[in-house]
Image: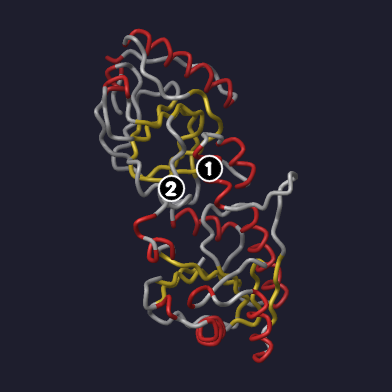
């Protein structure tokens, strides 16, 4: 997949274009992208996704920023997997926000991207003050012979629209299993492993530590079952390792910094410092809590390991002897 940035002028086309932030890249996004790719293949021209960085909300309301559900790297990966040929990343700032709906269509979608067809959801909004909508897009594009496809919202069995807002609600509640149903896959965090306080190593529970910022939407504090995902160098392949994941400020040791820590079941030999990894969440295990003693904490950690193995369908493993820990 080709990734281009604007500015400078990406000059793409002819093409079939879709537009969006694609935060979370949930089932609703996937349906729109699938239709974009289908039409592009029928016409034998590239399927193009126009996205924006940073999120417009971060520009217009910096005091009320929310973390992105997925990192830009993961959004690009999902778009590529769905069949998009070219992604154009538009730098979003206050100057760009003044673009009128007419100029956005005429100069960017048609002029820069060479759109012969545009595929969006019926709730699309664009241009200065979000003045442009689906009907405006369709009517204006008729002047240029550009086809516009307005797709209805994709809804769940309960009738609720798939949305990033719904995913955030579920993650805030720790319901990663239901969030996965809306996403169409497990929720993922991605970041570079950093040095922690090494308390886990001392307890026979070595962990890979990620910062809590800039890695995607972090679920509420608690213990989770999931997978630590390692990228195979010079390849698109990955290796999934079963993991118990802890999110919180570690109240047992009166810490205040919120962290994300993943312990790979049965492994004490992994040296992941400085490595770009992902963490996929499968299910919630328990809330974060402070135990009466370290011994009680160790008993609880053993139970976390058993429950995680059961959830993931892998053999049960136990804490390692601290003297055997070579990494983490």
The crowding category of the residue bearing disc 2, from other C-alpha atoms within 10 Å (few below 14, some 14 to 19, many at least 20), is: many
Left or right, 183 with reference to 155: left
* The quarter of the displayed image where residue 121 is located: bottom right
Q: CA distance from mark 1 to mark 2?
A: 9 Å
Left or right, 203 with reference to 6: left
Query: Marks 2 and 1: in contact by CB < 8 Å?
Result: yes
Whole-percent x, y for residue 205 in the image? 35, 20
Is residue 299 visible in this depiction of the protein? yes
Left or right, 319 with reference to 118: left
Looking at the image, residue 140 lies above or below residue 198: below
Residue at image point 49% right, 39% down: 172
Residue at image point 58% right, 65% down: 84
* The quarter of the displayed image where residue 105 is located: bottom right
* Mark drawn on residue 144: none
Is residue 112 visible in this depiction of the protein? no
Looking at the image, residue 164 lies above or below residue 248: below
Q: Earlier in the sequence, mark 1 or mark 2?
A: 1
Q: How many discs mark residues in the rendered view?
A: 2
Looking at the image, residue 215 lies above or below residue 154: above
| Mark 1: secondary structure | strand
* Mark drawn on residue 216: 2
**Residue at label 1?**
187
| Mark 2: secondary structure | loop
Front-lying residue, 167 or 233: 167
Whole-percent x, y for residue 80 in the image? 55, 60
Quarter the C terminus occupies: top left
The crowding category of the residue bearing disc 1, from other C-alpha atoms within 10 Å (few below 14, some 14 to 19, many at least 20), is: many
């Amino acid at each position: 997949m080709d990734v281009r940035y604007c500015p400078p002028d990406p000059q793409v086309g002819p093409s079939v274009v879709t537009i969006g932030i694609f935060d979370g890249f949930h089932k609703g996004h996937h349906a729109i992208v699938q239709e974009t790719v289908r039409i592009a293949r029928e016409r034998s021209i590239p399927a193009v996704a126009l996205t924006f960085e940073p999120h417009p909300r971060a520009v217009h309301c910096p005091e009320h920023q929310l973390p992105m559900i997925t990192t830009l790297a993961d959004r690009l990966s999902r778009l590529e997997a769905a069949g998009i040929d070219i992604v154009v990343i538009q730098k979003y700032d206050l100057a760009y926000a003044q673009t009128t709906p007419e100029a956005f269509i005429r100069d960017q979608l048609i002029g820069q991207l060479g759109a012969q067809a545009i595929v969006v959801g019926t709730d699309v909004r664009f241009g200065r003050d979000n003045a442009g909508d689906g009907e405006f897009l369709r009517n204006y594009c008729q002047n240029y012979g550009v086809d516009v496809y307005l797709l209805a919202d994709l809804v769940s069995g309960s009738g609720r629209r798939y949305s990033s807002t719904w995913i955030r609600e579920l993650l805030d509640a720790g319901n990663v299993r239901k969030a996965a149903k809306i996403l169409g896959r497990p929720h993922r965090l991605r970041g570079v492993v950093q040095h922690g306080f090494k308390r886990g190593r001392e307890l026979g529970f070595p962990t890979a530590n990620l910062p809590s910022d800039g890695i995607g939407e972090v679920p509420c504090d608690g213990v989770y079952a999931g997978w630590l995902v390692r990228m195979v160098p010079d390849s698109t392949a990955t290796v999934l390792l079963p993991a118990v994941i802890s999110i919180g400020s570690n109240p047992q040791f009166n810490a205040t910094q919120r962290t994300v820590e993943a312990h790979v079941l049965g492994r004490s030999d992994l040296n992941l410092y400085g490595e770009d990894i992902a963490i996929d969440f499968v299910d919630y295990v328990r809330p974060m809590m402070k135990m009466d003693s370290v011994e009680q904490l160790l008993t609880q950690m053993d139970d976390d390991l058993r429950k995680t193995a059961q959830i993931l369908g892998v053999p049960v493993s136990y804490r390692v002897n601290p003297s055997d820990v070579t990494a983490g």
